[in-house]
Image (cartoon, rainbow, N blue to C red):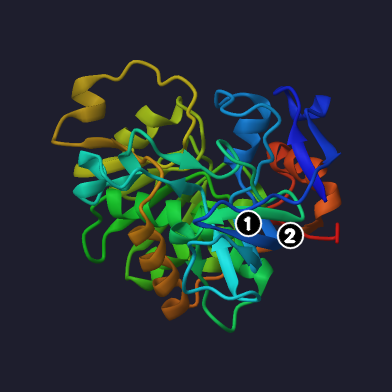
Amino acid sequence: MGAWSVTEPGPVEEDPLRFVERPVPEPAADELLVHVLACGVCRTDLHVTEGDLPVHRRGVTPGHEVVGVVAGAGADVEGFRVGDRVGVAWLRRTDGTCAYCVRGAENLCPASQYTGWDADGGYAEYTTVPAAFAYRLPEGVDDVALAPLLCAGIIGYRALRRTSLPTGGRLGLYGFGGSAHLCAQLALAEGATVHVLTRGEAARQLALELGAASARDAYEAPPEPLDGAIMFAPVGDLVPVALRALDRGGVLSVAGIHLSDVPPLHYETDLFYEKELRSVTSNTRADGREFLALAALHGVRATTHTYPMSQAAQALKDLKAGRFDGAAVLVNDLS
């Protein structure tokens, strides 16, 4: 089968992502073999490819927003049939027995593994997933529209909940790519006022089209104090900017897995009045199921730009350069 492989992490402009031929993977006893139909292009894929995230597996195939159909299953799998449509997301496996898993915080499991980082992901004709971590997908939504929901959507949902935003609260979104534009739709559906702070003119226009109350440059102040904010842009310099935009008792959650260094914070101007800074680490399967149900209920839809799977390297370059708004999705043209 055809697949993309991170040969040696480095700048995407130097083509560290290479196309290779590999055997179709054999699913383990508890895994599904999935024929990939579509795979979203996530900023985390860029971090893995460029080496911002330490290499977990040499030559790994990125991709963790996978929509596909079951093509086979291991001996211990029950409840799935060949032809079932499933989703494969970032969180691939946990031990299920540690203190974090037992208390419902499996996203903090020290033994957790991730699709497209610890195991080959969806920039390929086929991938595998433990059956217990595969998502059953809603009917009536096409593959391309669903793909970004499986990471961008789920992580945005967890980041939103981490802000503890009050009912009818004022939410700021710093950066407005694949995850933020899905998060904004859900927040608006739940009654929030959304202000978007981002560098791209096209992204600001999309934000206004989706119903944001304002859209300004990332370093500008929003038109009113914020009850909560989410940092989607992986830019540490924006953390004090966002904290200063918070009202008393406001919470800033940082959604990305990678963030450049945060400059020194000043207690009186940045953190006083019980402001909080919270990180977001992966997600639980419960987060995923809750978000997919809410997305179906409220009609949350990704703004997508499709690329053939054979052009995955170009899609990552365009992501880095900010050449599209919304989310990019690879459509399998390899088989």
Q: Helix or strand or loop: what does disc 2 sit on?
A: strand
Indicate left or right for 324 with 190 as reference.
right
Res. 282 in view: yes
Return the residue nearer the eye: 221 or 306.
306
The quadrant in which the C terminus is found is bottom right
Image quarter of residue 285: bottom left
Q: Residues within 10 Å of mark 2 (few under 14, many from 20)?
A: some
Q: Position of residue 212 (x, y in %)?
A: 47, 62
Label 1 vs 2, first from the N-terminus: 2
Q: Position of residue 283 (x, y in %)?
A: 38, 49
Q: Is residue 89 above or below residue 302?
A: above
The amino acid pointed to by label 1 is Gly
Q: Are marks 1 and 2 in contact (CB under 8 Å)?
A: yes
Image quarter of residue 331: bottom right
Q: Is residue 125 above or below residue 299?
A: above
Q: Helix or strand or loop: what does disc 1 sit on?
A: loop
> Which residue sits at x=63%, y=24%?
51
The image's mark for residue 211 is none
Indicate left or right for 173 with 10 as reference.
left
The amino acid pointed to by label 2 is His
In the image, farthest residue toward the bottom = 140
In the image, farthest residue toward the front = 75
Which residue is disc 1 drawn over? 326
Res. 225 in view: no
Which residue is disc 2 drawn over? 305
Q: Residues within 10 Å of mark 1 (few under 14, many from 20)?
A: many
Indicate left or right for 39 with 132 as reference.
right
